[in-house]
Amino acid sequence: MEFGNKVLSKELLSLLYESDKTVGTAESCTAGGIASAITMVPGASNYFKGGIISYWDDVKTNVLDVDAEVIAENTAVCEDVAKQMVLGAINALGVDYAVASTGFAGPGSEGDIPVGTIWIACGNKDEQVTLKLTDDEGRDENVGNAVTKALRLLLDFVSAHEPARVGEEVVELIAE
């Protein structure tokens, strides 16, 4: 999946490299995997500001400003938490777009939410979109799939909101 992630990251670069827009991440179950995939390509520092790994719920509530009541009622593995993580990353990092993940990669889970349930969200301050993954293919595959799906969701969202900017410098970076 690393090659596929690099292709998606290059497509993201083609949209954002010459723009003034920035991206950040808020990750739980992917633990920095999305940020790592985004920065696989030279030039990502032009638009990727950083990420927050919020493995514990108190990081979600204290750093990303996720509503503790929502977590108490639903666990952290729900659509609303994923959306709030996006908004929290946008505010904490000062970015235009953010992508977030929260889920149970395995082997354990909580309550009646099965292993492999992962919510991915991305968006800007005005709009967030989500994707729910439910297949359990083992921890490593679950995380890898979530990273790839998160990149695709982010790329699709940014594509819908940003014109492609492919200058000479971008073409050289993509060719690497």
Image (cartoon, helix red, strand yellow):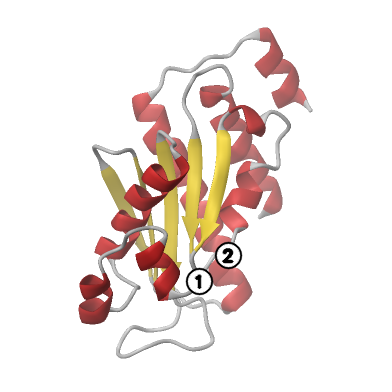
Residue closer to the observer: 7 or 88: 88
Residue 103: where, in percent of width, then height?
42, 72
Q: Which residue is mark 1?
A: 55
Give the residue drawn at x 69%, y 28%: 43
Give the residue drawn at x 49%, y 20%: 20
Image height check: is 153 above or below 66? above
Count of residue discs:
2
Q: Amino acid at mark 2?
A: Ala
Task: Farthest residue to the front: give it.
Answer: 62
Residue 98: where, in percent of width, then height?
43, 44
Q: Residue 159 is drawn in which quadrant?
A: top left
Q: Amino acid at mark 1?
A: Tyr
Q: CA distance from mark 1 to mark 2?
A: 7 Å
Residue 146: where, in percent of width, then height?
50, 61
Residue 153 appears in the figure: no
Give the residue drawn at x 54%, y 70%: 142
Locate the C terminus by quadrant. Answer: top right
Q: Are marks 1 and 2 in contact (CB under 8 Å)?
A: yes
Q: Which residue is mark 2?
A: 31
Q: Residue 77 is drawn in which quadrant?
A: bottom left
